Image (cartoon, helix red, strand yellow):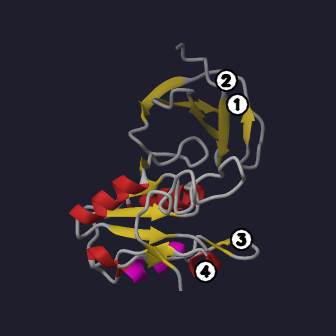
Amino acid sequence: MGLGMVTYALRFPGDRLLWALPNLKYQHRMEGAGQACDGKILPCQPKQTHLAEPLWGICLGMFMQKDIGEVGPQQAWKILSNDPTARLVDVRTRAEWSFVGVPDLAPLSGQTLLVEWKSFPQMQRNENFVSELLTGLDDAPASKLLFICRSGARSLEAARLVASALGGQDNPPECINVAEGFEGDLDPAAHRGQSNGWKAAGLPWRQS
């Protein structure tokens, strides 16, 4: 790929534009070109670019996201069974915990950590999610944090945020998304909890 083959740019103060290549391996800079875009990503044509240092995993948020590993419910149970410092974080709403149920870790002498990612009924983001999670951990070291929601979407967002927030710590926990979630995908009859997910896998769960 040549130096001029850049697709999008983000304008920063001082008229410096950071360029993102499609393969995200390198960073390009261009001085004094492009139009004011008020922090929005706009297509631009570079006048002059030069190859800069590798990104080394530093993301600009809009260009790339933190990679998160994913496991199925059975693999999540195996991790929790074999690693006493691994924790399961249920990020669903209080209504879901009460009426649908929660994973039951009593057979492992453990407890699911309940922290809302979004609150019902408006489904607004919990701006205190990370601090509430850390409070729930109570300074206990965790080697792995496994995040679960209804079907794996909210928990993936939560895992990415926590991985970014804690990434600068010494020995940060590995953040893992539980794919399929607690209820799993819709089956042909538009019902959850039958085709896949924690409940369909026959793993322990309880209702209040």
Residue type marked 2: Pro
Q: Specify the label residue 94 is tagged with.
A: 4
Q: Specify the label residue 46 is tagged with.
A: 2
Q: Secondary structure at mark 4?
A: helix
Please state the horizontal and vertical placement of residue 21, each as a whole percent of the image. 56, 27
Q: Give the residue displayed 60% in from the left and 17% down from the top.
A: 4
Q: Secondary structure at mark 1?
A: loop
Q: CA distance from mark 1 to mark 3?
A: 41 Å
Q: Residues within 10 Å of mark 3 (few under 14, many from 20)?
A: few
Provide the residue span drawn in magenta.
Answer: 129-136
Q: Secondary structure at mark 3?
A: loop
Q: Give the residue displayed 36% in from the left and 58% down from the top.
A: 76
Residue type marked 3: Met
Can residue 172 be seen? no
Camera-near label (1 vs 3) is: 3
Please state the horizontal and vertical placement of residue 206, each as a whole percent of the image. 48, 78
